[in-house]
Image (cartoon, rainbow, N blue to C red):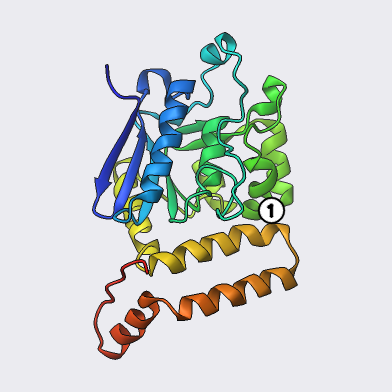
Amino acid sequence: MTDELIVERSGPVAVLIFNRPERMNAIGWSLLDKFRAAIKEVDADPDVRSVVLTGEGRAFSAGTDLQELASDNRSAGGGVEPVDPNAPGPWNMTSIGKPTVAAVNGAAVGLGVELVTQCDVRVGSTAARCGWAFPLRGLVPDTGAATYLLPYIVGLQTAMRWSMSGQMIDSDELLKRGFFAEVVEPDQLRERAIEVAQEMSVGAPLALRETKRLMYQSFGRTAGDHVEDNRAVLNRMFQTEDHKEGVNAFLEKREPRFVGR
């Protein structure tokens, strides 16, 4: 049987691919378990510097597999992990300290679009469409990404319209409102997403991890608390091997060789 989650490597980029095209990559419990495990594995792998998430076929993901949901009494909200105070954020794609890029190849609905929302950057194809259909099913957004992260990404008014109407939003509008960083032709999507992921991961791994953590955790605290944390992290970064390497590489006019220490 074809594996419903494929993990490929493109240099330092791990590419996670939902692979249930016959079901429009609907996410059942088995796929969700594999996805959560893969996220932990790529986060722990020092050779992986960034992550791309995409779907096989004509959809990114149609969301939760409602047939499985109806036959299993496990709770929904599949994209939320127990809160780790040392993680950048409580969602699957924010919980890892590496850049994450969604490559939205087609329709992303429900849990699918929640996972897209959780990524640090989103690149869409011209065929991409996103829909927060939860109110049409009598639900609120299942991972809380739309009700927390989406207003920061597109503004409160747009987030309200999208998450309350349940309408499908096309790639032009997603780009115009800043949900997508860029839109490319379908045959260029995965390659471009990998390029963006590589661009975001050239810095020192510790610095990238802490930058992501500081940014996501800034949402829920005062400016004073944030600056104090930022100052403490900066002082730790000054003591790292990668900081010394970054300075030496600049002075010697060469590319740095970061080791994550």
- Furthest-bottom residue in this view: 251
Q: Name the quarter where the C terminus is drawn.
A: bottom left
Q: Is residue 214 visible?
A: yes
Give the camera-side residue of 71 and 162.
71
Q: Is residue 104 visible?
A: no
Q: In the figure, is residue 28 to the left or right of 178? A: left
Q: Name the quarter where the N terminus is drawn.
A: top left
- Residue at figure coordinates x 47%, y 50% from the top left: 96
**Location of residue 79 (image quadrant):** top right
From what the image shows, is residue 112 above or below residue 229?
above
From what the image shows, is residue 158 above or below residue 215?
above
- Counting from the top left corner in percent of width and height, residue 121 is at 48, 53
- Counting from the top left corner in percent of width and height, residue 208 is at 45, 65
Residue holding disc 1: 155
Disc 1: CA contacts within 10 A as few (<14), some (14-19) or many (>=20):
some
- Residue at figure coordinates x 52%, y 14% from the top left: 68
